[in-house]
Image: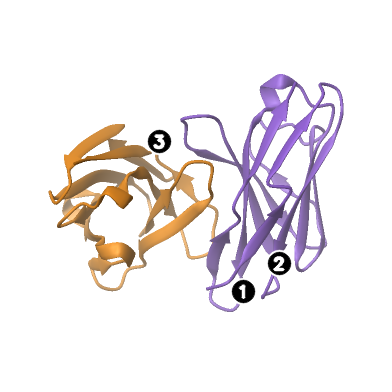
Chain colours: A purple, B orange
């Protein structure tokens, strides 16, 4: 099956700093990618839909100025957590939609810890 | 709006016993339904999906699920549990293939010797 990678897999940062997470589709071009957040022992919640070449669509309650999403190419979407706070500590998972078969493939996730 | 409800946040079975994880959906359009498995600190692995073809869907690792419109259910089963099946299982729904998913709260499966 298709592969989606995320980098980094784990990151620890200090409160107030910004962190960038990359999501790449390795063997297909993804015009659409999704970003989800998963708090410990909880389900995944959709944060935003990232479309190549246009602005991301954010879900209600997600601060677009805090979670900056850039889908600059057909294989890369980035999520930048700006001015991170401890409550932003979470597991961030991306997925990419293969336009050839409309299947959605998930990345392995990024564990963010804000101290 | 679409949603799924997973009944039972924790399920414990003995090795070799039947696994049954329950999922009920709510959807105003014919749903696309999915089951994913997540091992600790890892991403999601697709077990199976229903896309309006056969109502009985077979997936990987011996899992299967049956779509029952009359019951709005999509329960996941496996005839004989293995220790390696211990993980978190998520049911999810979307309105079309490739659309964003709405996940249930998850069911943690424990398999005892």
Taking B108 as reference, is A33 left or right?
right
| Label 3 sits on residue | B105
Spatial separation of the CA atoms under disc 3 and disc 2: 28 Å
Query: Helix, strand or loop at disc 1?
Result: loop
10 Å crowding of disc 3: few (<14), some (14-19), many (20+): many
Q: List x then y, in percent, for residue B5.
A: 33, 38
For this orientation, the residue located farthest to the bottom is: A100
10 Å crowding of disc 2: few (<14), some (14-19), many (20+): many
Front-most of residues B73 and B43: B43
Q: Is residue B60 above or below residue A113?
A: below
Spatial separation of the CA atoms under disc 1 and disc 3: 28 Å
Q: Closer to the camera: disc 3 or disc 2?
A: 3
Q: List x then y, in percent, for residue A103.
A: 52, 68
Q: Are marks 1 and 2 in contact (CB under 8 Å)?
A: yes
Task: Give the mark nearest the N terminus, 1 or 2.
Answer: 2
Q: Closer to the camera: disc 1 or disc 3?
A: 3
| Label 1 sits on residue | A99
Front-most of residues B4 and B7: B7
| Label 2 sits on residue | A31
Report which quarter residue B77 is drawn in.
bottom left
């Amino acid at each position: 099956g298709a592969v989606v990678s995320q980098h980094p897999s784990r990151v620890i940062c200090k409160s107030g700093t910004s962190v960038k997470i990359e999501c790449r589709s390795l063997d297909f071009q993804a015009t659409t990618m999704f970003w989800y957040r998963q708090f410990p022992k909880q389900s995944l919640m959709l944060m935003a839909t990232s479309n190549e070449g246009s602005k991301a669509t954010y879900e209600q309650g997600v601060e677009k100025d805090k979670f900056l999403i850039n889908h600059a190419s057909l294989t890369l979407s980035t999520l930048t957590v700006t001015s991170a706070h401890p409550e932003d500590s979470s597991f961030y998972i991306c997925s990419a939609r293969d336009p050839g078969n409309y299947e959605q493939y998930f990345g392995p996730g990024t564990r963010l810890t804000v101290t | 709006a679409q949603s799924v409800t997973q009944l039972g946040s924790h399920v414990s079975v003995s090795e070799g016993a039947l696994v049954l994880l329950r999922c009920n959906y709510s959807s105003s359009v014919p749903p696309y339904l999915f089951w994913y498995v997540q091992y600790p600190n890892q991403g999601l692995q697709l077990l199976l999906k229903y896309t309006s073809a056969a109502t009985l869907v077979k997936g990987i690792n011996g899992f299967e699920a049956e779509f029952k419109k009359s019951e709005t259910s999509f329960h996941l089963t496996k005839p004989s549990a293995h220790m390696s099946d211990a993980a978190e299982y998520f049911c999810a729904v979307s309105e079309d293939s490739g659309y964003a998913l709405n996940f249930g709260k998850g069911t943690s499966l424990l398999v005892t010797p």
